[in-house]
Image: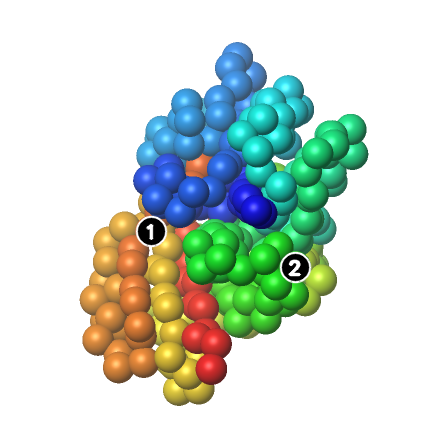
């Protein structure tokens, strides 16, 4: 009998509780300061990371190779026949490739590598859908076949107070050269079909950016029923207000307010407001 596991990395921004409830194993991204190294979600929280930004901006790095090796061995030792690995965009991180290199040395299990071509909670939403299919008893092949549809129905948008943190982290992608840090221009950023970040639209001022985010959500809700996550990166009051303003829409199947994790927050900076939308499969 087939036994299927699901592995992701902490870029997915799912809470430890959500990961546990859905039987998803997580590899923590490393968060590196000058004097110390932390593991995202394990030894540092997003709140602790945001508090530290005024004194030092850390960097991020791939999951520890030894930890990755141990987790893959754990799946093998526990009798899993298949492991579905669902990770942050390969264009934005080398995480998926690093896992693949270690997996090449393993035997006794079938590995399935899936590139979400996104990051943050949109990655998390995709991972949750994969885990749901596992719970439903789908085969690994059926899940891999369904993956493109899941990815195409998942959308992420985020606006920032500043692009400074994206620039520092090297995740500026196609945004580079398209945004002037002038006149309070606020971009709304998404990821494209190749997994690169790009400027979805620009607005002048924070209020207009948030209003545009709301309009983007309503455009999807006009087409189909959706699951929605409102995301806060040290922007809790604005995120709560956004949540309250949209939660009553009749085409929202489920909605929750979530935190942007430490590893992602390093690149978004404080004041980030995000939106994840999953269109129902009709």
Q: Is residue 265 left or right of residue 239?
A: right
Residue drawn 26% across the image and 79% down it: 249
Q: Is residue 188 visible in the rendered structure shown here?
A: no
14 is higher (above) or lower (below) than 150: above
Quickly name the residue at label 2: 141
> Where does residue 36 sit, x and y in percent of width and height?
51, 15
Residue drawn 33% across the image and 51% down it: 258
Q: Nearer the viewer, residue 153 or 162?
A: 153
User: Quick check: marks 1 and 2 in contact, CB under 8 Å?
Assistant: no
Q: Is residue 213 visible in the rendered structure shown here?
A: yes
50 is higher (above) or lower (below) than 159: above
> Where does residue 156 sit, x and y in percent of width and height?
50, 63
Which quadrant of the structure image shows residue 144? bottom right
Residue drawn 44% across the image and 68% down it: 277
* Helix, strand or loop under label 2: helix
Quickly name the residue at label 1: 258
> Where does residue 70 sit, x and y in percent of width and height?
60, 23
- Neighbor class of circle 1 (other Cα within 10 Å; few <14, some 14-19, many 20+) is many
> In the image, which is nearer the foreground, mark 1 or mark 2?
2
210 is higher (above) or lower (below) than 73: below
Q: CA distance from mark 1 to mark 2?
A: 31 Å
Residue drawn 44% across the image and 37% down it: 262
* Helix, strand or loop under label 1: strand
Which quadrant of the structure image shows residue 228? bottom left
- Neighbor class of circle 2 (other Cα within 10 Å; few <14, some 14-19, many 20+) is few
Of callouts 1 and 2, which one flags the residue occurring earlier in the amino acid sequence?
A: 2
Q: Nearer the viewer, residue 253 or 271?
A: 253
């Amino acid at each position: 009998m087939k036994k299927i596991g699901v592995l992701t990395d902490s870029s997915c921004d799912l809470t430890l509780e959500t990961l546990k409830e859905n039987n998803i194993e997580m590899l923590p991204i490393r968060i590196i300061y000058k004097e110390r190294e932390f593991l995202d979600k394990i030894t540092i929280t997003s709140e602790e990371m945001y508090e530290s930004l005024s004194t030092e901006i850390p960097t991020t790095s791939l999951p520890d190779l030894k930890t990755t090796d141990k987790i893959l061995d754990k799946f093998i030792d526990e009798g899993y026949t298949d492991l579905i690995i669902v990770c942050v965009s390969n264009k934005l991180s080398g995480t998926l490739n690093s896992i693949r290199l270690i997996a090449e040395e393993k035997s006794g299990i079938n590995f399935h590598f899936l590139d979400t071509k996104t990051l943050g909670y949109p990655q998390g939403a995709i991972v949750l859908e994969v885990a749901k299919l596992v719970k439903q008893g789908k085969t690994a092949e059926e899940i891999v076949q369904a993956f493109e549809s899941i990815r195409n129905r998942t959308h992420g948008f985020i606006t920032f107070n500043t692009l400074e943190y994206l620039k520092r982290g090297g995740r500026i992608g196609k945004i580079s050269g398209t945004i002037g840090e002038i006149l309070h221009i606020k971009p709304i950023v998404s990821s494209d079909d190749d997994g690169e970040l790009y400027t979805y639209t620009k607005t002048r001022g924070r209020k207009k950016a948030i209003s545009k985010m709301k309009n983007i959500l309503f455009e999807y809700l006009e087409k189909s029923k959706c699951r929605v996550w409102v995301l806060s990166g040290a922007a809790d009051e604005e995120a709560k207000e956004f949540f309250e303003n949209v939660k009553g829409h009749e085409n929202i199947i489920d909605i929750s307010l979530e935190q942007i994790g430490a590893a992602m927050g390093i690149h978004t900076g404080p004041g980030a407001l995000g939106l994840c939308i999953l269109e129902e499969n009709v």
